[in-house]
Structures are given as structure tokens and as C-alpha cells.
Image (tube, rainbow, N blue to C red):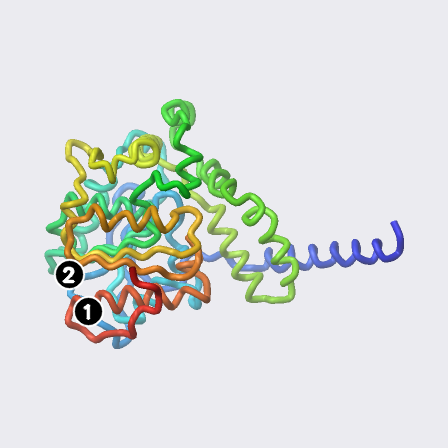
């Protein structure tokens, strides 16, 4: 090794050491906005975030339904990057459904147990607390798919439905995740593992972009080791990415088989419990927000919704960013709460916020 190579190696080791120390010094993030627990059942918790500011007052509370596959604190990562705080500051009364950590008792619960059970009972809690017959629902990714099913089955309880980066047609040609799991023997997987480890799903998600998600982001961070904000943001996102709950075995089996493998939702073949899920029964106003650079839920997978819902008030909005960046990136974070608040205001007779800055379809 010559002198130049030695100096470069020493500099690299020094930067790696500083980076490790900087990441290790970051406090964990688990929610930045004040909230209160208003309901708990088994592993499921319902949190309330009171409205603030002088923004639009909607007639119904807004319930955020997160995906089962990740922790919902991504929507409230830190004060400067918090979808929930942004919505609250715009005068929205926000509630968040946290599915929690499934244990052995949840191994055999079905999707119906979650949609027609836990979710429906949380909606009833909101209706009782607010005195409203209906609530507004905002679904995130898989939570959007579950919210669609709920709105189809319990339309009389849903005032307005907002879906964000939500898969609807699971067989679009550019859906890499669907192609990855379409031929998996999920019966054998669940029979062997029971509840499916979150680490296994993380591996599947990261494998869709192995270089970008496994190497490039760390090299990029190494170049920004002296940027305290960048290191803090990176550390909190990494914690969230790898802090994935296990999946209830039967729910996972049903979701993979019915949605990813059979594409039953758009084919009109989906049944939850004893009830058929017909998207034509979704007749309330629908706002469908998708991300332009989404690699997990391609835009086409979300845009398919318009052809299947029965509402006459349907709006699709394209926002910049990727699947997660839509909620946390500085470039896109203002767009989503502005879009949601303006859309709700236009349908509630309240004060209008500035028009959404995304691209309408």
C-alpha cells in the first residue's frame, strides 16, 4: 500500500467512526405530536390528536388507518417531518389506528377480524366520541386497501375516503412486489412460521432495489457525515425501516393469496368473512393520492381504482416522491397535508386551504 492509499484508508476509517458515533447518538423516534389513547383492544390502540390552529373544521373526524406491515410512527416521525402534525395544524381532528404487535393469540385471526372487527369497533368509538354518524378515513398503503374494503362493506359509516399510495390492481406489469410473491407457497410458509417475521418482509422489500436500498444510501450518507440533520433523519428512518412488526399468519396468507396472487379485489371475487367486497359500493367522495416515483405501489396499481368505485366524486392526485418520501421528504411533505385539507374543505363548507400542488388526473 502506497502513502496515498494509506491516507485515504485512514480518512475512510475516520469518517466511518464519526458516522457510527453520530448515528448512535440519535434519540429514537416514536412519535412527535402530543396524543391521547382513547381505545385499546387486544394489540390494537386508537390515538387522538386534537385539532389546532385556525384551519378547516371538517364535519367528521379523520381516522388514519395504517398498514399492518410497518409502524405508524412514520406518519409522525419528528416535528419537521410529520404528516399528523401538519394535518392537525390545518385544523383537522385526527385519530390514528395502531395495529400493534401480533402474538400467538392473533395467529389465526382473519382479514375480516381486522376490518369487520377491530377497525369497525374503532370507527364506532369515534362516532360515539364525536356524536357523528360518519367518519373520514385516510388509508396508508395496505391500510388504504383495508380502508377500501371497509368503505365497501360499511359505507354508511364513512363520510369521505382518502387512499394514499394504495394498491388496488395487484397485477399491473410494473408491480415488482407482486411478481416476487405471486408464486410463493404461502400456505407452506405460514404453516411453518405461524406469524410471519417482520425481518422476512424487510428482506423482500429491500430486494426490490438492492443497490439503492442496500449500498447507495449508505455511501451517500458517508459523504454527508458532517450534516447533523441528514444523519438524524437517516438514523430515524433506518430505525423505522427495520422496526417492522410480525404479521398475523392467517391475515398474511389471505392477503398474499387473495390480493397479490388472485387479484380478487378488482376481479370482484373478494370475500371477507361471509361478505362479498364490491368496490361499486364505495359511493362516498374518494381522493386517491399516489406517488410519482413509487416502486412498491406503482401509479398504475393505484389509478385502477377509478374504474371500480361507484362514486361520482372521484379525484386522483399525483404527488412527487416515492412510497415513503410522500410522507417524510422535505420536498413532498407539504403537498400531502395541503391536498387532504383542501379536498376536505371543499366538501365540508369550511375555509379553503391553498389548492393542492400535485398533478390532477
User: How far apart in space, not on screen, are marks 2 and 1 (Cα)?
Assistant: 21 Å
Q: Nearer the viewer, residue 75 or 177?
A: 177
At a point 15% along the width and 45% down the height, the residue shown is: 280
Earlier along the polypeptide chain: callout 2 or callout 1? Answer: 2
Q: Is residue 84 left or right of residue 151?
A: right
The answer to whether residue 353 shows anywhere in this view is yes
x, y (%) of residue 347?
17, 66
Q: Is residue 279 left or right of residue 191?
A: left
Q: Is residue 195 above or below residue 93?
A: above
Q: Quadrant of residue 277?
A: top left
Which residue is the site of mark 2?
Answer: 130
Give the position of the C terminus as an image quadrant.
bottom left
Q: Furthest residue to the right?
A: 2
At a point 44% along the width and 44% down the height, the residue shown is: 244
x, y (%) of residue 180?
44, 35
Between disc 2 and disc 1, the foreground one is: 1
Labels in figure, total = 2
Q: Secondary structure at mark 2?
A: helix
The residue carrying pointer 2 sits among few (fewer than 14), some (14 to 19) or many (20 or more) residues within 10 Å by Cα, namely some
x, y (%) of residue 76?
39, 60
Q: Is residue 262 above or below residue 234?
A: above
At a point 38% along the width and 68% down the height, the residue shown is: 334
Q: Secondary structure at mark 1?
A: helix
The residue carrying pointer 1 sits among few (fewer than 14), some (14 to 19) or many (20 or more) residues within 10 Å by Cα, namely some
Which residue is the site of mark 1?
Answer: 346
Q: Nearer the viewer, residue 151 or 175?
A: 175
Q: Is residue 8 left or right of residue 195?
A: right
x, y (%) of residue 78?
44, 63
Q: Quadrant of residue 173?
A: top left
Q: Say the numbered circle drawn on residue 205.
A: none
The answer to whether residue 37 shows anywhere in this view is no
Amino acid at each position: 500500500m502506497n502513502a496515498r492509499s494509506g491516507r485515504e484508508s485512514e480518512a475512510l476509517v475516520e469518517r466511518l467512526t464519526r458516522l457510527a458515533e453520530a448515528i448512535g447518538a440519535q434519540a429514537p423516534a416514536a412519535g412527535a405530536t402530543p396524543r391521547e389513547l382513547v381505545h385499546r383492544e387486544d394489540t390494537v390502540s386508537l390515538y387522538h390528536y386534537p385539532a389546532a390552529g385556525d384551519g378547516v373544521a371538517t364535519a367528521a373526524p379523520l381516522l388514519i388507518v395504517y398498514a399492518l406491515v410497518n409502524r405508524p410512527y412514520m406518519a409522525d416521525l419528528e416535528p419537521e417531518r410529520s404528516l399528523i402534525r401538519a394535518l392537525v395544524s390545518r385544523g383537522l381532528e385526527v385519530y390514528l389506528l395502531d395495529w400493534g404487535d401480533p402474538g400467538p393469540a392473533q395467529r389465526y385471526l382473519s382479514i375480516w377480524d381486522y376490518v369487520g372487527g377491530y377497525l369497525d369497533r374503532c370507527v364506532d368509538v369515534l362516532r360515539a366520541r364525536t356524536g357523528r354518524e360518519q367518519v373520514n378515513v385516510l388509508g396508508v398503503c395496505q391500510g388504504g386497501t383495508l380502508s377500501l374494503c371497509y368503505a365497501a362493506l360499511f359505507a354508511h359509516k364513512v363520510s369521505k375516503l382518502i387512499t394514499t399510495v394504495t394498491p388496488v390492481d395487484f397485477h399491473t406489469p410494473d408491480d415488482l412486489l407482486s411478481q416476487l410473491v405471486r408464486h410463493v407457497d404461502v400456505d407452506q410458509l405460514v404453516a411453518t412460521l405461524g406469524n410471519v417475521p417482520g425481518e422476512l418482509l424487510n428482506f423482500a422489500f429491500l430486494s426490490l432495489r438492492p443497490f439503492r436500498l442496500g449500498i447507495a444510501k449508505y455511501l451517500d450518507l458517508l459523504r454527508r457525515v458532517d450534516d447533523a440533520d441528514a444523519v438524524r433523519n437517516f438514523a430515524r428512518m433506518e430505525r423505522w425501516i427495520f422496526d417492522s412488526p410480525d404479521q398475523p399468519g392467517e391475515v398474511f396468507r389471505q392477503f398474499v393469496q387473495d390480493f397479490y396472487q388472485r387479484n380478487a379485489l378488482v376481479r370482484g371475487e373478494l370475500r371477507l368473512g361471509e361478505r362479498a367486497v364490491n368496490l361499486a359500493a364505495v359511493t362516498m367522495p374518494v381522493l386517491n393520492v399516489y406517488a410519482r416515483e413509487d416502486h412498491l405501489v406503482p401509479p398504475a396499481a393505484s389509478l385502477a381504482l377509478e374504474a371500480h368505485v361507484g362514486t361520482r366524486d372521484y379525484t386522483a392526485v399525483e404527488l412527487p416522491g416515492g412510497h415513503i418520501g410522500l410522507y417524510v421528504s422535505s420536498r413532498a411533505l407539504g403537498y400531502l397535508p395541503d391536498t387532504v385539507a383542501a379536498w376536505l374543505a371543499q366538501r365540508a363548507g369550511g375555509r379553503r386551504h391553498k389548492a393542492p400542488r400535485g398533478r390532477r388526473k
